[in-house]
Amino acid sequence: MHPAPSVIFFTVFSGIGFGLLTFLGLGYPAVTGWSAFAFFTIAYLCAVGGLISSTFHLGHPERAMKAFTQWRSSWLSREGVCAVIALITMALYGLGLVFFGQRWGILGLIGAIFSLLTVFTTSMIYTQLKTIPRWNSPLTPAMFLSFSLAGGALLAGQVKWAMALIAISGVIQVVLWMQGDGALKSSGTTLATATGLGTKGDVRAFEPPHTGTNYLLREFAFVVGRKHSMKLRIISFVLMVVLPVLLLALPFTHWLALLAVISHVGGALASRWLFFAEAEHVVGLYYGKR
């Protein structure tokens, strides 16, 4: 699929923001007053900034509020509902920490749960799509959740948790890449099954459906070269996993921690670009792109 910058920004930064809110809700770090205010400001800038950026990819952003009405059937709607509950609950929890020096544990726990649910529902928007076999895997929500918690632990200053979670997210990402490379083929979807003409004999396209470009080709038939894909995977893995873990293993300083955050986020952005660029939508079969 075409990797829209707004969606990449949304999935990375909202995930990190809600990951940080999860740790804050569980009491890590145990801060109050202005220190708590600083952590909550970073978390809300990431989470809310990411959510706002996602509306730029909508055809009619002014209708975004309608998404909340379809929570019974739509993962997008469930994501919105969970995000609102998480943000309101964590705002009340943050008020207690910042202005009263009180940790209202039940609010923090509820906020942490709904923060993780927000990330999970975001991942399910993509996981549910059988038309993209690479995404239609239990590893997709595992990847989203592990990235969120790894980034949250990193911003929360939980060094040991961050190192472990970054390593776990790296393993999940590599396995997802390996599984995804053969997902379309193993799904059994071909031009014959897509057209329903497989029983008639060999099926091939006589001519492409269109002589020029169109919306489907722009959005669903994006093709990234294998050579470029491998280079980007290596770059993203080094920035997202290897370098942050090495930096965190050194004696702690705020500058090293900042470099680890910058490296991890840069790698996560590259990884998420590949997540969309390598998506093989079955509609590409009609255009000879798969």
Image (tube, rainbow, N blue to C red):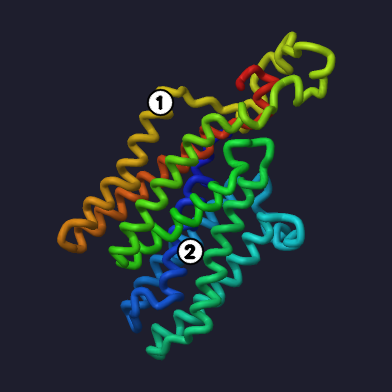
Question: Is residue 10 at all visible to an observer of this figure?
Answer: no
Residue 228: give its label: 1
Provide residue 276's location: percent of width, then percent of height. 53, 38
Numbered circle sitting on residue 18: 2
Query: Which residue is rendered at x = 67% and y = 19% of the image?
Result: 287
Quadrant of residue 288 within the rendered picture = top right
Image location (x, y in percent) of residue 24? 42, 73
Q: Position of residue 263 (x, y in %)?
A: 30, 48
Mark 1 is on which residue type? Answer: His
Q: Could you tell me which quadrant the N terminus lies in? A: top right
Q: Does residue 239 lie above or below 142 as drawn?
A: above
Secondary-structure class at tag 2:
helix
- Which residue is depicted at the point 39% across and 83% down? 98
Q: Nearer the viewer, residue 90 or 73?
A: 73
- Tell me, for residue 148, which label it has, or none: none
Question: Tag 2 or tag 1, which sits nearer the N-term?
Answer: 2
What residue is drawn where x is 36% and y is 40%? Answer: 236
Residue furthest to the left in view is 251
Residue 178 in the image: above or below residue 262: above
Q: Which amino acid type is marked by label 2?
A: Phe
Q: Are marks 1 and 2 in contact (CB under 8 Å)?
A: no
**Above or below 55: residue 212:** above
Picture quadrant where residue 189 is located:
top right
Secondary-structure class at tag 1: helix
Q: Position of residue 173 (x, y in %)?
A: 44, 44
Q: Is residue 145 above or below residue 60?
A: below
For the residue carrying disc 1, how many other residues have a C-alpha within 10 Å: few (<14), some (14-19), or many (20+)? Answer: few
Q: Is residue 210 left or right of residue 280?
A: right
